[in-house]
Amino acid sequence: MKLFDIAHSRAGDKGNTLMLSLIPYNEADYEILCSSVTAEKVRMHLKEVVRGEIIRYELPNISSLLFVCHNALSGGVTTSLAMDTHGKSLSYALLEMDI
């Protein structure tokens, strides 16, 4: 099963730090996300892009996870020569992860 089967994602970026949220379509799937989507699994899934630490925050009041990914945007929007230096496309990459 892919993450996109049970969740969607929003993204934000600031400098070279990326924030990825993971939000289940059904609140009952929040526990599946907590047990299946660890910071280590996200680090392995995005290892070609995220060079720094990934910290996972659990947000049970809104049934969501937040991943803060450091050193993830090739230096940041204003310094990178990459075609897409924003985090939005990486939220779609996260949803491609098998769980």
Image (spheres, rainbow, N blue to C red):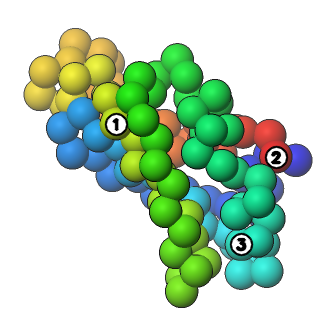
Q: Are marks 3 and 1 in contact (CB under 8 Å)?
A: no
Check disc 2 and report the residue beneath it. Answer: 99
Q: Amino acid at mark 3?
A: Tyr
Q: Is residue 75 above or below residue 20?
A: above
Residue 15 shows in this picture: yes
Q: Is residue 32 left or right of residue 15?
A: right
| Within-10-Å neighbours for mark 1: few <14, some 14–19, many 20+ | some
Compared with residue 25, is residue 73 higher up or lower down, i.e. above or below? above
Query: For numbered disc 3, what is the local secondary structure?
Result: helix
* Distance between the alpha carbons at the discs numbered 2 and 1: 23 Å
Q: Is residue 85 left or right of residue 59?
A: left
The residue labelled by disc 3 is: 30
Q: Nearer the viewer, residue 87 or 68?
A: 68
Please report whichever mark, 2 or 3, sits nearer to the chain's N-terminal start.
3
Residue 18 is tagged as none
Residue 64: image location, x then y, percent: 57, 71
Residue corresponding to mark 1: 70
User: For numbered disc 1, what is the local secondary structure?
Assistant: loop
Q: Can you tell which quarter of the image residue 9 is in?
A: bottom right
* Amino acid bearing label 2: Ile
Residue type pointed to by label 1: His
Q: Nearer the viewer, mark 2 or mark 1?
A: 1
- What residue is shown at x 82% (from left), y 46% (from top)? 99
Q: Nearer the viewer, residue 13 or 68?
A: 68
Q: Earlier in the sequence, mark 3 or mark 1?
A: 3
Q: Position of residue 12 (x, y in %)?
A: 33, 52
Residue lying at 77% horizontally and 53% vertically, measured from the top left: 36
Query: Which residue is more in the foreground, 13 or 31?
Result: 31
Give the distance between the C-alpha atoms of the residues marked 3 and 1, in whole angstroms: 24 Å
Question: Is residue 87 at all visible to an observer of this figure?
Answer: no
Whole-Å distance between the Cαs marked 2 and 3? 13 Å
